[in-house]
Image (spheres, helix red, strand yellow):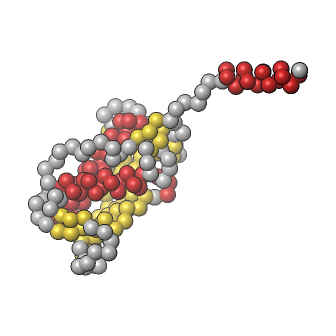
Amino acid sequence: MKRLLALIAITLFGCSQTPAPTAKHYSLAAQPLPLTEPVSLSTGTLILSSLTIDHHLQHKGPVLLMADGRLHISQQHRWAGALPNQLQRLTQESLAMLLPHWQQVGRKHTPAPVVLEIEISRLFGAPDGTTRLSGRYRLYKQQQLILQRSFALEQQQAASGYAAMTDSMRSLWLSLMTQVSQSIIKP
């Protein structure tokens, strides 16, 4: 009888607990790109060789940089998919729109096309509504480095919250892709 009462008490206690909040998911690459004029109508072949993201950004959710320098990763706000995959897709779609006559090919394509490498060191929001993106990119032609450029972009979010931060990150990425495509045409 005591066991039955204990089982009922545990069941009632478990049912009375507030359920855990449902995680919200965000994507940088889910929405269609805004229509943008091509940077160039020239032709060429491009390989996106690598897109690397610093280890402190490889979490399941967007990263906030707190005022005291700590990084905060929310348990209730998550990426809809792996961040590197989202950025890879957004990069390919952006470059296809900005350089519509350039062919994007796999890594083993010959003759040697233009090769793009991107390294991301920072991609985070801050409690003050600022979103930051920084890193560097390199362009190679015929296996020779022709350009290495650092970037540091910053933007105020249009509103507060994780959805606005994600929109701002996407906007910064599209600005970066415009710079990259201009560099591909005129290194």
180 and 1: which is toward the camera = 1
Residue 149 is situated, as x and y percent measured from the top left of the image, at 29, 64
Q: Residue at x 37, y 39 (%)?
A: 165
From the viewer's perspective, tell me whether residue 121 is left or right of residue 185.
Answer: right
Residue 87 relative to residue 71: left or right: left
Q: In which quarter of the image is residue 150?
A: bottom left
Looking at the image, residue 12 sits to the left or right of residue 147; the answer is right
Residue 23, given in percent of the width and then of the height, sits at 50, 35
Q: Nearer the viewer, residue 28 or 180?
A: 28
Q: Does any portion of residue 104 appear in the rendered image?
A: yes
* Residue pictured at 60% horizontal, 27% vertical: 19
In which quadrant of the rendered view does residue 126 lie? top left
Q: Position of residue 169 (x, y in %)?
A: 34, 45
The answer to whether residue 50 is above or below residue 144 is: above
The image quadrant where one finds the C terminus is: bottom left
The relative height of residue 160 versus residue 29 in the rendered view (above or below) is above
Q: Is residue 177 above or below residue 103?
A: above
